[in-house]
Amino acid sequence: MQRPTRLLCAMILCALFPVPALAGAWLRDEGAAFLSFSITLEEPQDWGAPDGYGAFYGEYGLTPDLTLGLDLGTDESGKSKAFAFAVLPFKRDGMLINFEIGAGVDDGDPALRPGVSIGRPITLAGLGGWFNVDTRATITQGHDPVFASDITLGLITSKRTKMFVQLQQGGPMSDPDWLRVASSVIWQMTPDRHLELGVTTGITGAESLGLKLGIWQEF
């Protein structure tokens, strides 16, 4: 793969077009790949030991109209997930819309995970950025569907830094939803690699405070 193609997403992030590294409503370019690994540590428990969870996420642009991905990890309750998914475009101009269909395992049960992402580039206070809404439903046999939505506002603050704030909501239809706010700052360490440092704050039904450390890698 030629070097300009490999670096296209990083160039976009840093200067040319305000989109997030986690694609959301933006498909990967053909032949472009993205990987991220993150660990979130919660507040220490009563016995003084911190609790936490990790996630691995990857995307690959198979064609201009098809992005494939993997979403693996656990959550603060200890439940595990492992999904393979495909993302297809529905609307490319103005407000971008993608459809996603995923299949895998949720806490040991076979599951389907359809979703939709809506986003667009924005300009705020003279800074380029992006606005994105991701909504997914995890469907397993014998359980209520679990819905999760992320509303993200991101800004490119310099050629090497960007930041975003995200409102995260979800839960099964039969239980009260959880709601939290997550914010992160991302530093470009090399043209292909970024470091993420973030904080999560629970509003209801989620951990009260968490610290997130992540690595983003593009190919």
Image: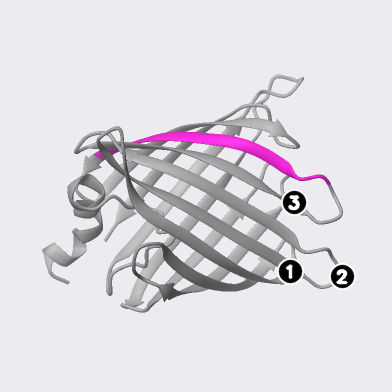
Q: Residues within 10 Å of mark 3 (few under 14, many from 20)?
A: some
Q: Residues within 10 Å of mark 1 (few under 14, many from 20)?
A: many
Which percent across, then down, holds residue 11?
19, 53
Q: Nearer the viewer, mark 2 or mark 3?
A: 3
The part of the image, by quadrant, that contains residue 89 is: bottom left
- Secondary structure, mark 1, is strand
Q: Amino acid at mark 2?
A: Gly
- Secondary structure, mark 2, is loop
* Cα separation between marks 2 and 1: 9 Å
Q: Amino acid at mark 3?
A: Gly
The part of the image, by quadrant, that contains residue 96 is: bottom left
* Cα separation between marks 2 and 3: 16 Å
| Marks 2 and 1 close (CB-CB < 8 Å) | no
Which residue was labeled with disc 3? 171
Work out whether mark 2 precedes mark 3 in sequence or the reverse, and give the earlier one: 2
98 is within the stretch colored magenta: no
Which residue was labeled with disc 1? 139
Q: Is residue 22 left or right of residue 148?
A: left
- Is 195 placed above or below 219 here? above
Highlighted range, magenta: 176-188
- Secondary structure, mark 3, is strand
The part of the image, by quadrant, that contains residue 188 is: top left
Which percent across, then down, holds residue 210?
59, 30
Q: Residues within 10 Å of mark 2 (few under 14, many from 20)?
A: few
* Cα separation between marks 3 and 1: 12 Å
Which residue was labeled with disc 2? 142
Residue at point 73%, 69% (across, down): 139
